[in-house]
């Protein structure tokens, strides 16, 4: 059965919908948000929609749908693309985009689309085991991510950005936190785009009794860290192996990261780490670290 999507009041095949969107003219802005499923069920859908609607309301864009209607349509799109093969997961995206008006006197056209895509969970398998590399532009310049990034695939190497004052903020497509003396260090949220996964990680810290310090941190502070991790919708939480080539702590993932990953698995009721490892490309299979899943 072909994949189905919602587009401007209609359910169409995804091929038809994407072709129609290409023919609508050049996009001049808009907002989107993406969730993932666990065992076929969307995770924190409403929190993602709250963030989406905060953006479109702030920008004065009328999606023509209430947040409740957007939520109901998202669940309908997800239902239309079920059942999923065993072990498979999806991402679900809501897009509210503005296109060039047909004439200069017309208002911009608003396109509302909701669609699903397969989530390649196997792309994260080795990163759960070996961790990811983080580099800062001060040291290395803008690095290559090896052909993929936190939003689209396995983020083997991530750029950690800094604000105008030189303090660390977030990674491309992911929030960043590090650990010193068993306490999680969170870059000041005024300087980052707080993700739903970041909020989930902080809630899990609270439930586990892990203290969180929020402040402005310099790059040099990272070299005193015992561990670090990045959070994003697709992979939830990935351990950081190195910062600018400097290895953090004695093991990857570190003990705090492992506790958070275990709590996340319990929260969603799916061992997403094992799921990812089992679906890793055969040539890059695990190297004796399966016990950490």
Image: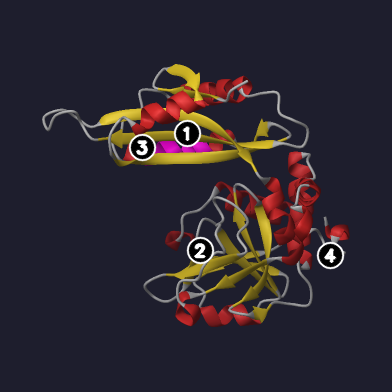
Residue at 35% over, 29% down: 111
Marks 1 and 2 sit apart, C-alpha to C-alpha, by: 23 Å
Left/right of residue 234 with respect to residue 29 in the rendered view: right
Residue with the mark numbered 2: 170
Q: Which residue of the protein is positioned furthest toward the top in this rendering?
A: 10
Residue 205 vs residue 64, the one in the foreground: 64
Q: CA distance from mark 4 to mark 1?
A: 38 Å
Q: Is residue 260 left or right of residue 217?
A: right
Query: How far apart are the two marked residues, 4 and 2, measured between alpha carbons?
Result: 30 Å
Q: Position of residue 220 (x, y in %)?
A: 55, 83
The alpha-carbon separation of the residues under discs 2 and 3 comes to 23 Å
Principal secondary structure, stretch drawn in magenta: helix
Closer to the N terminus: mark 1 or mark 2?
1
Work out whether mark 2 precedes mark 3 in sequence or the reverse, and give the earlier one. Answer: 3
**Label 4 Cα neighbours within 10 Å, binned few <14 / some 14-19 / many ≥20:** few
Q: Are marks 1 and 3 in contact (CB under 8 Å)?
A: no
Residue at position x 45%, y 24% in the image: 16
* Label 4 with label 1: CB-CB less than 8 Å: no
Q: Nearer the viewer, mark 3 or mark 4?
A: 4
Residue 89 x %, y %: 68, 37
Q: Which residue is mark 1?
A: 94
Outermost residue, left side: 105
Q: Earlier in the sequence, mark 4 or mark 1?
A: 1
Q: Which residues are magenta?
A: 48-56
Query: Residue 288 has which mark?
Result: none
Q: Is residue 107 left or right of residue 56?
A: left
Q: Is residue 77 magenta?
A: no
Quadrant of the frame with the C terminus: bottom right
- 199 displayed left or right of 161: right
Q: Which mark is residue 287?
A: 4
Dot 3: what SS? helix
Q: Secondary structure at mark 1?
A: strand
């Amino acid at each position: 059965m072909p994949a189905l999507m919602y587009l401007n009041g209609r359910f169409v095949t995804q091929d038809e919908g994407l072709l129609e969107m290409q023919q609508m003219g050049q996009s001049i802005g808009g907002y989107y948000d993406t969730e993932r499923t666990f065992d076929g069920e969307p995770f924190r859908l409403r929190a993602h929609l709250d963030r989406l609607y905060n953006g479109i309301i702030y920008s004065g864009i009328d999606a023509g749908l209430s947040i409740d209607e957007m939520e109901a349509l998202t669940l309908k799109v997800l239902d239309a693309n079920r059942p999923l093969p065993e072990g498979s997961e999806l991402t679900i995206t809501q897009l509210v985009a503005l296109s060039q008006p047909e004439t200069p006197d017309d208002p911009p056209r608003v396109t509302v689309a909701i669609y699903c895509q397969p989530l390649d969970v196997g792309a994260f398998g080795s990163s759960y085991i070996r961790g990811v590399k983080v580099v800062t532009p001060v040291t290395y310049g803008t690095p290559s991510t090896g052909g993929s990034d936190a939003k689209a695939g396995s983020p083997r190497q991530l750029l950690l950005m800094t604000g105008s004052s030189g303090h660390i903020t977030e990674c491309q497509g992911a929030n960043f936190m590090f650990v010193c003396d068993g306490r999680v260090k969170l870059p000041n949220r005024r300087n980052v785009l707080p993700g739903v996964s970041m909020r989930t990680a902080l809630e899990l810290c609270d439930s586990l009794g892990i203290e969180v310090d929020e402040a402005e941190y310099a790059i040099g502070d990272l070299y005193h860290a015992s561990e670090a991790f990045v959070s994003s919708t697709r992979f939830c939480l990935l351990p950081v192996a190195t910062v600018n080539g400097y290895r953090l702590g004695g093991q990857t993932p570190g003990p705090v990261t492992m506790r958070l990953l275990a709590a996340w698995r319990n929260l969603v009721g799916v061992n997403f780490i094992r799921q990812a490892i089992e679906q890793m490309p055969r040539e890059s299979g695990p190297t004796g670290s399966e016990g950490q899943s």
